[in-house]
Image (cartoon, rainbow, N blue to C red):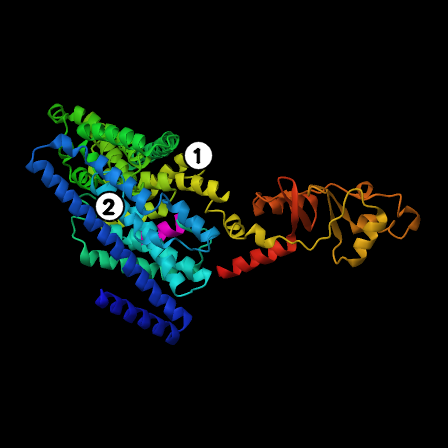
Amino acid sequence: MRTDKLLLRSLRRVFFFARNRLTARQFMMLSCIVIGVLSALAGIVLKFIVHTIGVWVNHYASTYEQFYLFAFFPLIGITLTVIYIKFGLKGIFKRGSAEISYAIVRKSAKIPSNQTYSHVITSALTVGFGGSVGLESPMVTTGSAIGSNYGNYFHLPYKDRTVLVACGAAAGIAAAFNAPIAGVLFTLEVLLADATIGLFIPIIIAAATGALLSKIILAEDVILSFSLQQPFNYHNLPFYILLGVLAGFVSLYYARIIEWTEKFFGARTNNRSKIIIGGLTLAGLLMLFPSLFGEGYESIKMLANLKPLEVANGSILYNYLHNDFTLLIFISALVFIKVIAVGLTLGSGGNGGNFGPSLFVGAYLGFAFARLVNLTGLAQIPETNFTLVAMAGILSGVFYAPLCAIFLIAEITGGYELIIPLMIVSALGLTVAKYFEPLSMEGKKLLKLLNMTVHNRDQFLLSKLNLQDLLEQSFSAVRPDDSLRLLVRVISISKRNTFPVVTREGELVGVVHLDHVREIIFNNKLYDTTLVKDLMTEAHAVDMEDSLHDILKKFDETRQWNLPVVKNNQYLGFLSKARILTEYRAELMKTI
């Protein structure tokens, strides 16, 4: 213990020494490397734990010949995850990229320190024991939390903390697939709206560091990688176009099923019933489709290596699948069953993400499509290529991140031989999905949290402003029954030209503008006969819950520079358009 404390103290001194001796930019570059290393190590540890648990589970199932017990292991993992969240984290647990974007905008890029390890523990338990979800989302959240807490520890400004959050996320994806470009693009497409050229270098450094560490430490069989057997043939272009359209509809199905399962389990407050419903249903599916166990990357490799029958090993349906068409039906069914398995795992309390499952669904869709074309004799198309390209189509259609999808598959196949079909299928998959659903699943969650999407830069910057901080309360209020004499007295000591009219209960009923009463304030005869309620005009109030984007619209509609703010019709103060624009400009300057 003393050695650990001494080591931590020494490292702390080294970093503070470096910060004091280096320029801000130099220290930032060093920090990007550190975040890349730490995020990659967290991801590598997670992969190692999951791999170790998976080996033990497989050994147990084969040694004792208890395959049916094997199907119930996910129930154990989900139960342990729920117990840890309830007692270890006191029931407070956030997941998904929308929560990271929310933290960047509303919490000054500050993520709770327990997220540097909680996602590793929960996803290791869930996926290690066979939960049918991916590890990439927990790796992204863990990396982002590491970047955020590193920035907090060294008291770095908001802009630098945001960069480090992005660096952690990019390093997480890069380490997961040994794909640094995909890590950078995922961060820019999914997490950040106000990305500028200045952000690229730090994120690239972190992603490259994460990918390098992953390549050095992780074994080849742990990382998803492929080798192409056939180059792209332009004669197959019509089939790639059709595959892209199919990918869009399957992506839409994916999003709808996940949202439905979230609502289904969200309506149930009893954790025990969630675990029983989700875990037992998942166990039943695993008996039929064993490749649903865990991430499922091994079964993707089987398809890419043209060994489709192996994905049915252990299934109670195995003896019925030696016919080409029955095997095709089995593989096609997994395209749709996998999504249900993901929803069951997450809904019952497990932790994981949709990144890996979207690749799984894409691989099975692409292989099934190519095998169907080949069996019907329409053409002879390369099943491996279609398996890989469809992965990009589903990833693009689920996350609305086409560039990440394109370059991820290009990187894990070791080149750009398929770049043209990757671009076509990814673009079509996104186009079809977006036609029916303008926002991705994470985009919808962010819209609920912030009333904005990550791709609207103006709204993204405006949402960083705190309405409470912009509230001005130096306006002198008057009562509806006050006389003109009293109003003149208030005007004489006020530095403002607008006066809210408020009842004794604090309710805003109107406003008085100096320009509207200027002509009568010098008429002494009206001082005691004219009341404020005779002079006031409509307040055009905005609500405290309104977004700044909507408030600015109201400024334009009313042509006012100051608008009153209410909550439950109770007067709170005024908002100044000039001040909002000044603060917006300040936020804009932070991104340059």
In this rendering, position of residue 262 left or right of residue 557: left
Q: Is residue 423 above or below residue 325?
A: below
In this rendering, position of residue 334 left or right of residue 495: left
- Number of numbered discs on residues: 2
For the stretch drawn in magenta, the main secondary structure is helix
Three-letter residue code for mark 2: Ala
Judge the density around disc 1: few (<14), some (14-19), many (≥20) Cα neighbours within 10 Å: few
- The mark closer to the camera, 1 or 2, is 2
Residue 314 appears in the figure: no
Extent of the magenta region: 181-190
User: Disc number at residue 435?
Assistant: 1
CA distance for labels 1 and 2: 36 Å
Q: Position of residue 53 (x, y in %)?
A: 17, 45
Q: Secondary structure at mark 1?
A: helix
In this rendering, position of residue 347 left or right of residue 435: left
Quarter of the rendering occupied by the N terminus: bottom left
Three-letter residue code for mark 1: Tyr
Find residue 384 and report its image quarter: top left
Residue 369 appears in the figure: yes
Q: Position of residue 381 (x, y in %)?
A: 22, 35
User: Disc number at residue 124?
Assistant: 2
Q: Nearer the viewer, residue 385 or 193?
A: 193
Find residue 502 and report its image quarter: top right
Q: Is residue 255 magenta?
A: no
Q: Is residue 260 above or below residue 26?
A: above
Determine the residue positioned at 40% across, 41% down.
442
Determine the residue positioned at 70% across, 47% down.
559
Q: Is residue 183 magenta?
A: yes
User: Disc number at residue 268?
Assistant: none
